[in-house]
Image (tube, coloured by chain):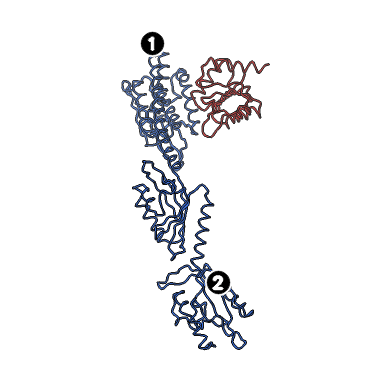
Amino acid sequence: MLDAPSLSGRSILHAIPVPAIIMSTNLEIIDVNAAFESAVARQRATLLDRPLFDEFPPRPETPNLEATIRASVARAVDTRQTDALEPGRHDIVMSDGGFETRYWRLSHSPVIEGGEVTCVLQLVEDVTAEVTRQLLLDARERTAEEGAALAFWDLNLVTGKLVRSGGVDSMHGFAPGEVGEDIEPFIERVHPEDRDRVRMEVFSAAEQGPGPTNLEHRLLLPDGTIRWISARGEILPGPVNGEPHLVGMVVDITEFRQNEERLKTALANQKILLDEVNHRVKNSLQMVASLLSLESGRASPETRERLMSASIRVNAIATIHASLYLDGDVTSVAVDQQLRDLCDHVAASSGCDVRGITIDLDLAPIRLCPNQAISLSIIVNELITNALKHAFPGRAEGKVQVRLTRDGSADELVLTVTDDGTGPSEAAGEQAGRSSGLGQRLIHMSARQIGGRIEQSRSPEGWRTTLRFPVPG
Amino acid sequence: MRILIVEDEVFIALDLEMQILDMGYEVVGIAATKETAIEIACAQVPDLALVDLHLAGPSSGAEAAAFLRAELGVPSIIVSGSLHELTELDIASIAPVSLLGKPFSPVKLQAAIRDADTGRHR
């Protein structure tokens, strides 16, 4: 049982119209008045004889509260004078268990009886309104500082009252002073397709409580103009009844969004242009192949053969661009399809079916970039035409096999061209050697160009040339 | 005159080689990358290089030509379909004998090479 002040002392406590408590010098609550009860939403009976900080434990935001108050009480007792504190924050627990932000101005006064300090009177003033008003002003200033060119606003989420800088009005197409404080005219200018989303996001921000919130949406002005705006704000409790305010800034991002659209369109256009270029290149190359072919018609047999072989080489490149154009993908070629076309063309030009020679294809569905595809095409062209020219001298039939596979373990592609005719060492005459000189150089240089290597060997199926070259993944 | 060809397009390289040989000059090698060009140039020390600006992959013809000029004193004729990409800095460090745009006619190529030959002996 603590030393209690006299009954009249207690009565005076209960008459004080501001929240007040009497506590012992070591901060145990002796008595509280009705004003204190309602200020902190607690029952008197639950507080009597309880240590102050057991009943009002400091919150994480205010870890130094206990030390500050103890120090103030100590000063009051020592100096026998009232010690007043600067307003401080101490959130209180509501009946539903939640916390409410409160700011208090405390003072401690020593009660002297018989020359001794018997207990301490604490007066508590709720200054939440004063403090939050100041915080709101500070937030507005912060916002204004952060963006001198930006528009800021302060929306009372309960009353729908909108305090704002002039930029907000002009952004929404209003003349200065044209609309009042109500948010409704602004909501009306939100694009109809975005309105529901905007309403929903504003109210869910209110429910979420403190923390920044972001919102991007369109405005539709009466004259049909569409603008994109980006609003960013924070929730703060306001000075009146703690009504939540959404305070923030808004930026016109219409130009930014338009640039995005322009970029997308430019990309699409670029693809169309690339298509167009590939188409033209394909046509040009085919023109060249045809020109050579035409010339060959009026030439001597030897010249004709050279022109035709040149025409076929040009065609090997032309088919690449044809594939690029057809595909829709202008950055890679389906080489299996393209090689098939190439072999068909070479076979037809060399009179394969008349000679009884077949070209067998076993090609994995692989895509390569145009450069690799062209090099591969040149190599296959040379190997096949070489085989067709020299491997079957005077024979009634023969077979050329072309195989393209992926060697996953080495990240390589493997091309093999095998003919069951005579190998190079058995090739008849130096005529064969000379005319394939350029062809051999083309094969080796093209292989080098794609980082590949050529090997020749005799296999059960016949004479084989193998090309291995690296491909990513 | 001994000439190095720096060109990654196979057909074009072989065509250049044939034309140079027809003119009576010697071809010391054909390089498709900057690295190969420098390698051959160091080994063979040609009198002149024919360099395409665009080489395979990250290789740079301009860098190869600049190296040849600075480290080996080998002058270059720059051959390219994209001469407009040459910066003032490139031209200063390469100090090309002449610039040939693609496609070039055999006549223009011959003239450029013969000029380089004459200039060499002055």
Image vertical order of residue A318 relative to residue A48, above or below:
above
| Amino acid under disc 1 | Arg
| Residue that carries the numbered disc 2 in the rendered image | A65
Say whether disc 1 or disc 2 marks the residue closer to the N-terminus.
Answer: 2
Q: Residue A30 carries which label?
A: none
The local secondary structure at tag 1 comes to loop
| Nearer to us: label 1 or label 2 | 2
Where the C terminus of chain A falls, by quadrant? Answer: top left
Q: Which mark is residue A298?
A: 1
Q: In which quarter of the image is residue B24?
A: top right
Q: Colour of chain A?
A: blue
How many numbered discs sit on the rendered protein? 2
| Rendering coords of residue A337 (x, y %) | 36, 32
Q: Quadrant of residue A322?
A: top left
Q: Colour of chain B?
A: red
The local secondary structure at tag 2 comes to helix
| Rendering coords of residue A354 (x, y %) | 31, 20
| Rendering coords of residue A468 (x, y %) | 46, 35
**Foreground residue, B47 or A301?**
B47
Question: Disc 1 is attached to a residue of which chain?
Answer: A
| Amino acid under disc 2 | Leu
The extreme right residue here reads B122
